[in-house]
């Protein structure tokens, strides 16, 4: 049976991407704020990345998480994925909502979260 998905798993895909970018493990580690040892362990299949690390790798290489995990051979990020700068801003907004900031800041955070939800809903309907 012919598979549409590569037999390449996360560890192999990570190494392939890193080398195709011409980076050493140390250079990649510095770029995404990890230790070189962690990159080595990921590539050796001895460790599995956290969601946060997976997200940093996806953003750095500009590929979809499915591609990096070996679930598809299409490296193109899905159209429904929010750009990294929006994800970063939303994380900051979540922190604002949890703290005791002035009412106006909470209102702004809520408004931006609604906008992000609307954008996400539009992307899902495509």
Image (cartoon, helix red, strand yellow):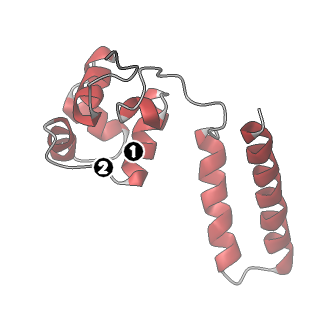
- Image location (x, y in percent) of residue 95: 62, 70
- Image location (x, y in percent) of residue 28: 30, 33
Sequence-wise first label, 1 or 2: 2
The quarter of the displayed image where residue 30 is located: top left
Q: Which residue is drawn at 40% across and 38% down?
A: 57
Crowding near the residue tagged with mark 2, few <14, some 14–19, many ≥20 C-alpha atoms within 10 Å = some
Q: Which residue is drawn at 29% across and 27% down?
A: 13
Q: In this view, does 76 lie to the left or right of 97?
A: left
Location of residue 17 with respect to 93 vertically, above or below: above
Kindly state the secondary structure of the residue where label 1 is placed: helix
Crowding near the residue tagged with mark 1, few <14, some 14–19, many ≥20 C-alpha atoms within 10 Å = some
Q: Residue furthest front?
A: 1
Q: Which residue is drawn at 55% across and 29% down?
A: 77
Location of residue 120 with respect to 21 vertically, above or below: below
Kindly state the secondary structure of the residue where label 2 is placed: loop
Tags 1 and 2 in contact by the CB under 8 Å rule? yes
Front-most of residues 90 and 75:
75
- Image location (x, y in percent) of residue 100: 70, 84
Location of residue 111 with respect to 63 vertically, above or below: below
Residue 49 - label: 2
Give the quarter of the figure containing the N terminus: top left
Give the quarter of the figure containing the C terminus: top right
Q: Which residue lies furthest to the bottom in this view?
A: 100
Residue 54 - label: 1
Q: Is residue 117 left or right of residue 58?
A: right
Q: Is residue 25 left or right of residue 76?
A: left
Front-most of residues 63 and 29:
63
Q: How far apart are marks 1 and 2 (CA)?
A: 6 Å
Q: Which residue is drawn at 49% across and 36% down?
A: 59
């Amino acid at each position: 049976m012919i598979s549409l998905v590569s037999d390449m798993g996360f560890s192999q895909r990570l190494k392939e991407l890193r080398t195709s970018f011409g980076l050493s493990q140390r250079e990649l580690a510095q770029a995404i704020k990890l230790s070189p040892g962690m990159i080595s362990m990921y590539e050796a299949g001895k460790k599995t990345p956290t969601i946060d690390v997976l997200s940093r790798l996806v953003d750095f290489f500009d590929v979809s998480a499915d591609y990096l995990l070996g679930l598809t051979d299409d490296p193109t990020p899905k159209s429904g994925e929010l750009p990294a700068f929006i994800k970063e801003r939303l994380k900051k907004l979540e922190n604002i909502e949890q703290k005791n900031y002035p009412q106006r800041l909470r209102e702004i955070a809520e408004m931006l979260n609604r906008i992000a939800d609307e954008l996400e809903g539009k992307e899902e309907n495509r």
